Amino acid sequence: MSKRLEDFIEMNRDQFDDLEPSADLWAKIEQHLPAHHAELKIREAKTFSLGFVMRVAAAVIVVMGIGFATYLHSQRKQGVDLAAINPIYAQQQVEYTSMIESQRTELKSIAKTDPQLYQEFSTEIAKMDSTYNKLKSELPTSPNQERILHAMIRNLQIQTEVLNQQLNVIEQFNKMKEDQKNETKSI
């Protein structure tokens, strides 16, 4: 039976396909729908209006602002007063940190003349600096803050020693270059 139906439809397809709904059919259907449907349609149109988008954007900005303020507040709380732990260590930390900064600035002067040597020296210092930063992050939650602070100071001492050695190597290297230039000029 289904085969006969399919054959019938195939044979009369042109007669079935010639009828299409008119363009205003949906408008006629909407006229017969209850008024409640029209209100829903108007609400849906308002949902994505500019005012709605602006309210959502304002709410997002307020939430992000509150989150950022909370983050900043928590960061300030995590800061530890080193002088309260040990005033001598706090003073040493400041001294070593400033010494390291000046040594690093001096070390950067060779970056242009010998970038490979500078890269090797920077890699060593970066390893020690990451250890220092790890200790610094552990400091606020450590039960023995003075011990962590002492380890941080020791790390800074080692960094200054290594930087001094690196600067001495650079100085000797430059002196050797200068001596070689003078020898070649005298020949």
Image: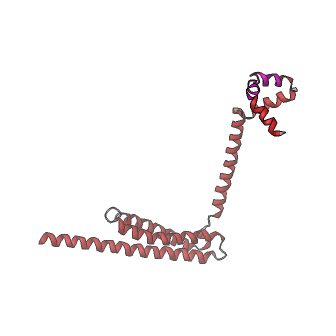
Placement of the C terminus among the 4 image quadrants: bottom left
Compared to residue 7, the image places residue 28 above or below, namely: above
Residue 13: x, y in percent?
A: 74, 29
Residue 177: x, y in percent?
A: 24, 71
Q: In which quarter of the image is residue 185?
A: bottom left
Q: Which residues fall within the magenta stretch?
A: 12-30
Q: Which residue lies furthest to the left in this view?
A: 187
**Which is nearer the eye, 27 or 67?**
27
**Which is nearer the eye, 3 or 69?**
3
- Residue 143 among magenta residues: no
Residue shown at 57% from the left, 70% from the top: 134
**Which is nearer the eye, 60 or 32?**
32
Residue 127: x, y in percent?
A: 49, 71
- Residue 22 among magenta residues: yes
Placement of the N terminus among the 4 image quadrants: top right
Lateral position of residue 78 relative to residue 90, left or right: right
Residue 148: x, y in percent?
A: 59, 75
Scheme by which the image is coloured: secondary structure
Q: Quadrant of residue 110?
A: bottom left
Residue shown at 86% from the left, 26% from the top: 33
Lateral position of residue 7 relative to residue 76, left or right: right
